[in-house]
Image (cartoon, rainbow, N blue to C red):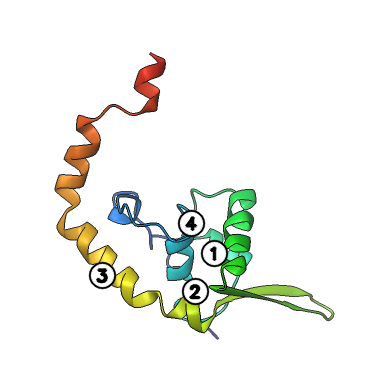
Amino acid sequence: MRVPLDPEMFDPVCPSDLSPIRVGDKWGGMIIRCLEHGPRRFSELRVPLRGITAKVLTGSLRKLERDGLVRRTAYAGAAPRVEYELTPLGRSLLGPLDVACEWAWRNVDALLDAREAVPGPEAARG
């Protein structure tokens, strides 16, 4: 039995959203983190990624699969299921993600200051 993903894995104030380094798309790095300790079902991934819609998660998983970072396995049977897991190529990103996360934590104040200093697109709409 595998350990469930922590629903607070990606705290809203976590710098994962602050990192300018992206894997695939906004959610790619976080999905890779969710798969770090083994295969997961779609519904399991949605627990810590509570801000993602099913449509966007599906698209992100497809992009990661297309890029060779994630493998999708469908199991037939009385209770069919699909699991996602990291490929060796996807697993090779864990070290660089650790470095990017550490950088974001060290620079969180500067990143937040920079984002507050430059108005976003919503400010232009008035």
Looking at the image, tell me whether mark 1 or mark 2 is earlier in sequence order. Answer: 2
Image point 25% across, 37% down: which residue? 115
Residue at which label 4 appears: 49
Classify mark 2: residues with Cα within 10 Å, few (<14), some (14-19) or many (20+): many
Q: Mark 2 or 4, which is nearer the eye? A: 2
Q: Is residue 53 visible?
A: yes
| Corner quadrant of residue 75 | bottom right
Image point 15% across, 46% down: which residue? 110
Q: Quadrant of the C terminus?
A: top left
Residue at the front extreme of this rendering: 67
Picture disc at residue 35:
2
Asked whether the beta carbons under mark 1 and mark 4 sit within 8 Å of each other, the answer is yes
* Helix, strand or loop status at disc 4: loop
Residue at which label 1 appears: 45
* Helix, strand or loop status at disc 1: helix
Asked whether the beta carbons under mark 1 and mark 2 sit within 8 Å of each other, the answer is yes
